[in-house]
Amino acid sequence: QVQLVESGGGLVQAGGSLRLSCAASGSSSNINTMGWYRQAPGKQRELVATITSRGTTNYADSVKGRFTISRDNAANTVYLQMNSLKAEDTAVYYCVFTPRRIITSQMGVAGSYDNWGQGTQVTVSS
């Protein structure tokens, strides 16, 4: 059973930065896709960014140029560096994992991921 442990959320002023981390344990596969979704109050869950074990990345248009996803394959950990944060980035951020590389067109489909973290709150004050 894969477990995802998230950390790094918090409260920050608009224009500030935060870094989220998610460590995956319990997977025997070196091939996988990890990433982040988010859900704001009253809104649907949406893709933020994903990265495959080969390093292929995919970003939501709303975060391109501000957020950077990266990973440490040896540690099975994914990071999300969030810069120039805006009030509209306020949401619960969820780490996602699936033990396969998924194609770009499927990265925005929530059902593509087998495992979800508990979520970490990110609040950006304006």
Image (cartoon, rainbow, N blue to C red):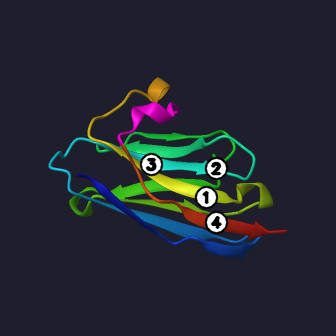
Q: Mark 2 points at which residue?
A: 39
Q: What element carries label 4?
A: strand
Mark 4 is surrounded, within 10 Å at the Cα level, by few (under 14), some (14 to 19) or many (20 or more) other residues, namely many
In the displayed structure image, the side of residue 99 where residue 80 appears, left or right: right
Q: Do the residues labelled 3 and 2 touch (CB within 8 Å)?
A: no
How far apart are labels 3 and 1 at the CA level? 14 Å
Q: Mark 4 points at which residue?
A: 122
113 drawn magenta: yes
Q: Name the residue under label 3.
A: 35
As drawn, 87 above or below 30: below
Q: Mark 1 points at which residue?
A: 92
- The first of marks 3 and 1 along the sequence is 3
- The first of marks 2 and 1 along the sequence is 2
Q: Position of residue 119 (x, y in %)?
A: 52, 60
Q: Where is residue 33 in the image (x, y as percent from the top left)?
A: 35, 42
Tally the numbered discs.
Answer: 4
Q: Where is residue 18 in the image (x, y as percent from the top left)?
A: 59, 70
Q: What stretch is highlighted in magenta?
A: 108-114
How far apart are labels 2 and 1 at the CA level? 5 Å
User: Type of residue at label 3?
Assistant: Gly
